[in-house]
Image: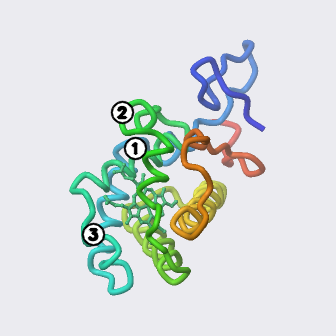
Amino acid sequence: MTEPGASGQPGTKEKPAGEKPGPPSIYEWAGGAAALSRLTEVFYGHVLQDPVLAPVFAQMDSRHAEHVAKWLGEVFGGPRDYTVGLGGHPHMANKHLGRGITEQQRRRWVSLLVDASDEVGLPADPEFRAVFMYYIEWGTRMALIYSGENPPPVDVAEVPVWQWGQTPPWQPDSA
Ligand code: HEM
């Protein structure tokens, strides 16, 4: 398990001389803000062409893709931009309330995001994709729960921060 560094992000804690540094954050491994912005831009482009999802996102805010990129960045250990400037977890959860997301819509959302991840060239190593999809599977199921009847209270949670957990990235000794 990676310990948080001085900045609160994984992999940034200073190590005694000679000790191998921890892995970069998942956010850094993904390619940072630019990679996540490109991902959500391409993803929502596909969403708007998709017969299952286009009606769900017909009224979306013009900055939606940008906001979701910031959310994902924070989840994967990047800057806390969504918490600081975009309303944090309560705002995100509120956006899903009452939408009655179906399992078919959730699956399509996941499927199009995987397609977009390949299209924009997110890292394809097993460890990164496993931890990325771990969050996406969890997050889409949470969105479905918040969108349904009897959602959990929206104001009690922080933006979750994902860790490499069981599958830290493989790095050659020379790295
Ligand atoms: C990991 C999964 C998900 C993440 C990270 C996510 C993230 C977000 C965020 C951050 C917002 C608020 C954007 C803002 O601040 O303006 C939002 C809104 C929204 N989400 Fe999700 N979402 C997920 C899953 C889903 C799914 C599965 C659906 C439906 C199939 C969905 C439908 C919507 C809709 C319709 C909105 C409102 C869009 C708007 O009016 O601008 N979300 N989502």
C-alpha separation, residue under disc 1 versus residue under disc 2: 10 Å
Mark 2 closeness class: few <14, some 14–19, many ≥20 residues within 10 Å: few
Which of discs 2 and 3 lies nearer the camera? The answer is 2
> Where the N terminus falls, by quadrant?
top right
Residue for badge 1: 70
Q: Identify the mark nearer the N-term, 1 or 3.
A: 3
Where is residue 109? Give x, y as percent.
Answer: 46, 73
The residue where tag 2 is placed is 85
Q: Are marks 2 and 3 in contact (CB under 8 Å)?
A: no
**Callout 3, which amino acid?**
Gly
Seen at 37% across and 58% down, the residue is 39
Residue type, mark 1 in image: Lys
From what the image shows, is residue 129 above or below residue 25? below
Q: List the single residue furthest toward the front.
A: 150
Residue 61 horizontal side relative to residue 151, left or right: left
Q: Is mark 3 within 8 Å of ligand 1?
A: no
Q: Crowdedness of circle 1 by 10 Å Cα count: few (<14), some, many (20+)? A: many
What residue occupies the far left of the structure in this picture?
62
Measured Cα–Cα span from mark 2 to mark 3: 25 Å
Q: Name the quadrant where ligand 1 sits.
A: bottom left
The mark nearer the N terminus, 2 or 3, is: 3
Alpha-carbon span between mark 1 and mark 3:
17 Å
The residue where tag 3 is placed is 45
Dot 2: what SS?
helix
